[in-house]
Amino acid sequence: AISLKTSDWKGKRVLVVAVPGAVTRTCHGQIPGYHKLEKEFKAKGIDEIAVLATNDAFVQNGWGRFMGIKDELIFISDTLGKFSAALGLANDKGTGIRAARYVLLISREGTVEKLLVEPGAGVTLTAAESVLAGL
């Protein structure tokens, strides 16, 4: 595992796709859309797609491999939920600190370009197709 800082993305337009947990039914169904549309996201100026969950780095790495995703997306761990909490997007519903389901678009200058927070338990606003259409 490596330590990652948002400053590492300076000069890149990064789409952070946050999910409450790796390998959960809803989360596991959401991420393949980003993998499938990765080239379309790149064509719209996205340099990197990062999948964030509050699972540890080993789970995140294994989850990506399990889905057959190599280097097209990066899987990052917000183990203690600090990144999501700093955005006001972490919660604890009895299973430990979890990220809310959200998509954060970080500009090349390092500012928040767009933030989409899923209003319910499903995947609508943060579905890959919806996010791509909004770029």
Image: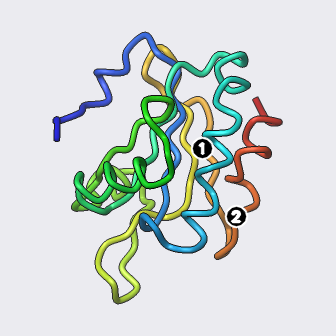
Extreme right residue here?
133
Count neighbours of disc 2 (C-alpha within 10 A) and say few if under 14, some if 14 to 19, many if 20 or more: some
Which residue is at the front of the view, 66 or 132? 66
Residue drawn at x 65%, y 16% as measured from the top left: 45
What is the x, y in percent for residue 126?
Answer: 67, 53
Which amino acid is tagged 1?
Answer: Leu
Residue drawn at x 83%, y 36% as measured from the top left: 133
Quadrant the N terminus occupies? top left
Q: Closer to the N terminus: mark 2 or mark 1? A: 1
Residue drawn at x 76%, y 60% as measured from the top left: 124
Which residue is at the front of the view, 94 or 58? 58
Mark nearer the viewer, 2 or 1: 2
Instruction: Label 1, secondary structure: give it.
Output: strand
Extreme top residue here?
11
Q: Exactly how many numbered labels are in the figure?
A: 2
Quadrant the C terminus occupies? top right
Display coloring: rainbow
In this view, 133 is above or below 20: above
What is the x, y in percent for residue 75?
Answer: 38, 43
Which residue is at the front of the view, 1 or 4? 1
Check disc 2 and report the residue beneath it.
Answer: 123
92 with respect to 79 (left or right) = right
In this view, 88 is above or below 128: below
Quadrant in which residue 76 is drawn:
top left
Residue drawn at x 64%, y 30% as measured from the top left: 38
122 with respect to 14 (left or right) = right
What is the x, y in percent for residue 12?
Answer: 46, 15
What is the x, y in percent for residue 70?
Answer: 43, 35
Count neighbours of disc 1 (C-alpha within 10 A) and say few if under 14, some if 14 to 19, many if 20 or more: some
Check disc 1 and report the residue beneath it.
Answer: 115
Instruction: Label 2, secondary structure: give it.
Output: loop
116 with respect to 109 (left or right) = right
